[in-house]
Amino acid sequence: MGGCFSKPKPVELKIEVVLPEKDRGKEELSAGGKGSPRAYQGNGTARHFHAEERLPAPHPYPGAQDCLEAAVCHIKDLENGQMREVELGWGKVLLVKDNGEFHALGHKCPHYGAPLVKGVLSRGRVRCPWHGACFNISTGDLEDFPGLDSLHKFQVKIEKEKVYVRASKQALQLQRRTKVMATCISPSAGHSSSTNVLVVGAGAAGLVCAETLRQEGFSDRIVLCTLDRHLPYDRPKLSKSLDAQLEQLALRPKEFFRAHGIEVLTEAQDPEASLCPAGSQVVTVDVRNKKAVFKDGFKLEYSKLLLAPGSSPKTLSCKGKDVENVFTIRTPEDANRVVRLARGRNAVVVGAGFLGMEVAAYLTEKAHSVSVVELEETPFRRFLGERVGRALMKMFESNRVKFYMQTEVSELRAQDGKLKEVVLKSSKVLRADVCVVGIGAVPATGFLRQSGIGLDSRGFIPVNKMMQTNVPGVFAAGDAVTFPLAWRNNRKVNIPHWQMAHAQGTTSPAAAWGGRLSQSLSLPQAHPLSCWPWVLLTGSAIQGSVAACPASPMQVVKAAHRDLPSQTSVQCPLDIPFHEPQRPTSLVPPPASLSFPFVLRDTCSAEFLTNLCSHPGRERGV
């Protein structure tokens, strides 16, 4: 099967531009066409906006000179349930026909730029073919993650049996819409020592929580603190594109946070990058007095607290573990250094999980040699089983990756302080100029041990279905939590996945303010498989669609290789064809399409699902 992968393709990152603040008022409103009429005071009670604070209700098309209108097709060109990309002057539009009505939307998923025409249309929603983000075709609003932004919704009219679409030029170029947000009316005066909302952790869960509050009209102070040196960025991208620069990874620009009054405490030395004078590391939480204590002694009082600290990577404990040029991929600087050191030289990856395999795949064209060391018999064995693991292993071997299985590192040898060799317990010695360690992660909750906030035996924070901890007013979300999963009889599980973190970030603010936010903000329970991990291997992503099966609740029936041309077939042990995606005729209601590392022809096993949700040593699913 290696022939089709003989020359890995470079990864193309599609980064869209966020609408400038001066034009943000021109955006369409969220679902229902109305902004939230409420904001919330520090004590959580509701109050109405003053006239000068009320969110504007702008027209989506500010002037005829800024718009394009044209006939894009005949009304009979599309059947019910069909989608088509149509040209409209400066760009393309996704035209959808559903229940006899036409809808026009942005044609690219704002998350990574996937063509939505290749996605799935079901029940008035279109789902992204790559990572499963879901958009309402009537409003364009994002209704399922990953991603932060919604789609533009364009005007459609029918005249003389032709379909006309009217769209602003700017919207056609941007292909994304940020929902209208409230502004902070109580900014910190001289860096006040109190805040209404404190979020510990500025990953997906923390950022989505802050944005959700602003979208729902919350106008008091919000503070995020992070151990990173940078504003929130897309960490899962690091292992998929090690060369990516910070500006390509940033989830929001600095101006966004300033405009919406979301303060971010970082470890950056640049005072412009950190909005508070204190260091960003919280060392303990005083739940009785509602205060977070920072490393330098600064105390910040809060009304509501969201804990989203994420996880910390496991490191090697062997001899020589502190030599230079050994990395865990946690920051853009880590990823960039790995590429520089590996170029034309020898790279060793310890761990054949999601992160390790993606790093190995990315380095195949960069490094002189790539070696993978793994304790298991095959890659992904605990998640996908031995057959799929062996198929992936053969694909990598055809791309010059060498595997050393059922062994581990016993020593790291250095020359002049820098890594030179990796010694395995099997006595094999590997030449190595750089080593990447991807052997799992543990919850970063050590600072909570004496706080009174409950932790389980593995260090995770148990929460209820509204993401509340054992302490009133303290919530938790993201990789560090276990939550009750309905389809497992409310057994508490941990799913360390980017998409799940997004979803939990919307649930926690809804609970914190007594459910006064949109009723749509609730933790998805019916189909947690929408959070299956996905990987990018040898420059390409492999994905599939799930369809209903009379014999079982779910079965993979179609597969798609994103970067292969149409009708391309790949021979592999599972005998699964790879081709351009087509919409299955019978879909499991949401999610209608799922993305994951490889496809299984047989029914998904309960063992695999159990491992995905509860295996204590697994890597984060990115």
Image (cartoon, rainbow, N blue to C red):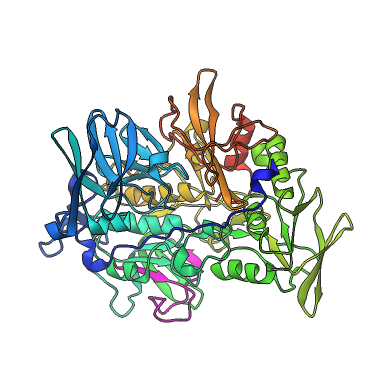
Q: Nearer the viewer, residue 509 or 250?
A: 250
Q: Is 231 colored magenta in this rendering?
A: no
Q: Main secondary structure of the magenta part?
A: loop
Q: Is residue 471 something one can see in this rendering?
A: yes
Taking 195 as reference, is 229 left or right?
A: right
Residue closest to the far right: 427
Locate residue 100: give its quadrant: top left
Quarter assignment of residue 363: bottom right
Q: Say whether residue 262 is visible.
A: no
As rendered, which of 385 and 264 lies closer to the eye? Answer: 385
Q: Name the residue furthest top.
A: 550
At x 25%, y 59%, the residue is: 170
Residue 452 vs residue 348: left or right? Answer: left
Q: In this figure, what is the number of numbered marks?
A: 0
Q: Residue 213: x percent and y percent?
A: 30, 56
Please identify the quadrant where the N terminus is shown. top right
What range of the chain is rendered magenta?
A: 261-285
Where is residue 380 drawn, in percent x and y? 67, 43
Q: Residue at x 44, y 56 (%)?
A: 204
Q: Which residue: 32% across, 67% down?
A: 256
Residue 308: give x, y in percent of width and height: 47, 57
Question: Quick check: is 284 in the magenta stretch?
Answer: yes
Expressed as whole percent of the image width and height from the top left, the position of residue 559 reads 54, 35
Q: Is residue 130 left or right of residue 364?
A: left
75 sits left or right of 408 in the view: left
Q: Is residue 349 above or below residue 277?
A: above
